[in-house]
Amino acid sequence: MSGTETPILRLSGITKSYGTVQALRGAALEVNPNEVVALVGDNGAGKSTMIKVISGVVQPDTGQIEVDGQPVTFGSPLAPRKYGIETVYQDLALASDLDPAANLYLGREILRPGLLGRLGVLDKPRMRAGADEAFARLSVGLQDTRSRVGTMSGGQRQGIAVARAVLWASRLVLMDEPTAALGVVQTDRVRALIESVREQGVSVILVSHNLPFVFEVADRIEVLRLGQRVAVFKRSETTVEQVLGAMTGALSAT
Ligand SMILES: Nc1ncnc2c1ncn2[C@@H]1O[C@H](COP(=O)(O)OP(=O)(O)OP(=O)(O)O)[C@@H](O)[C@H]1O
Ligand SMILES: [Mg+2]
């Protein structure tokens, strides 16, 4: 990772208040091409608020967002999508009654060519083929791809949600606590998914309280405390103790 490349995403001076609560106080974040960045911090540090700013769900009061060095405005959740930025929400936002393929194309359904398409008839074979290809590429193990997503395990649903984000993300995937509800095996599955995402040249911002997991998957670790970035670490040059120190304020910022 050279120090001279332009980040694919840069946030600076981001402030956001909810009434009297200052969730973000001049927060900053950078993501380089092909990089997994972990965003860590204590409860209430502002991590989810940052993710929501990037996914266009929350509008910051002040601050700048740049994509490839160009200023952008993410005024709605549709805006970041145009830049190839997709989010895996903590609740996964899957439709339980639909099968995995339908979930992958939720809101972006492919219609049949010609008149049938103009009448709104879905091209299910094409969507199913696209879904199967995405699940295979990301090694999402689904025994029955025609079952309703609601019947599937937590790890499988996580895999489907990540696959949906990756299918549409050409630049960056945001994940807020992707392993919070998962067991050891399922957590390992998400780790493998994050690695496949990076192999496809897509960067990841990962919010997690699971520091051992963060140390397994992240290239860099950015620490938020009280709504500000207080430290940036290269994973390979850092200990868990240093990160914990920055999170709690026991160590001075680097
Ligand atoms: N919609 C909201 N309305 C009011 N206050 C909010 C709202 N969302 C967040 N906050 C407040 O903003 C601060 C930052 O919250 P945020 O959810 O970003 O923290 P976090 O770092 O994600 O914490 P956690 O690790 O617990 O998920 C907190 O004090 C929180 O109570
Ligand atoms: Mg949060």
Image (cartoon, grey):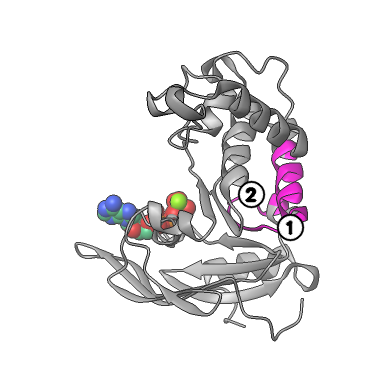
Looking at the image, is 102 positioned above or below residue 17?
above
Q: Quadrant of the N terminus?
A: bottom right
Q: Give percent across and percent down for residue 21.
A: 26, 63
Q: Which residue is at a point 58% across and 43% down the rendered structure image?
A: 178
Q: Is residue 252 magenta?
A: no
Q: Which residues are magenta?
A: 188-213
Badge 2 amino acid: Asn
Q: Nearer the viewer, residue 205 or 252?
A: 205
Question: In the drawing, what numbered circle is on residue 210?
Answer: 2
Q: Which residue is at a point 43% across and 25% down the rendered structure image?
A: 115
- For the question of whether residue 11 can be seen, the reply is yes
Q: Is residue 161 left or right of residue 228?
A: right
The number of numbered discs placed on residues in the rendered structure image is: 2
Badge 1 amino acid: Phe
Is the residue indicated by label 2 positioned so its CB lies within 8 Å of ligand 1? Answer: no
Question: In the drawing, what numbered circle is on residue 86?
Answer: none
Q: Is residue 214 left or right of residue 62?
A: right
Provide the residue designation for mark 1.
215
Q: Which residue is at a point 54% across and 57% down the rendered structure image?
A: 84
Q: Give percent across and percent down for residue 177.
A: 55, 46
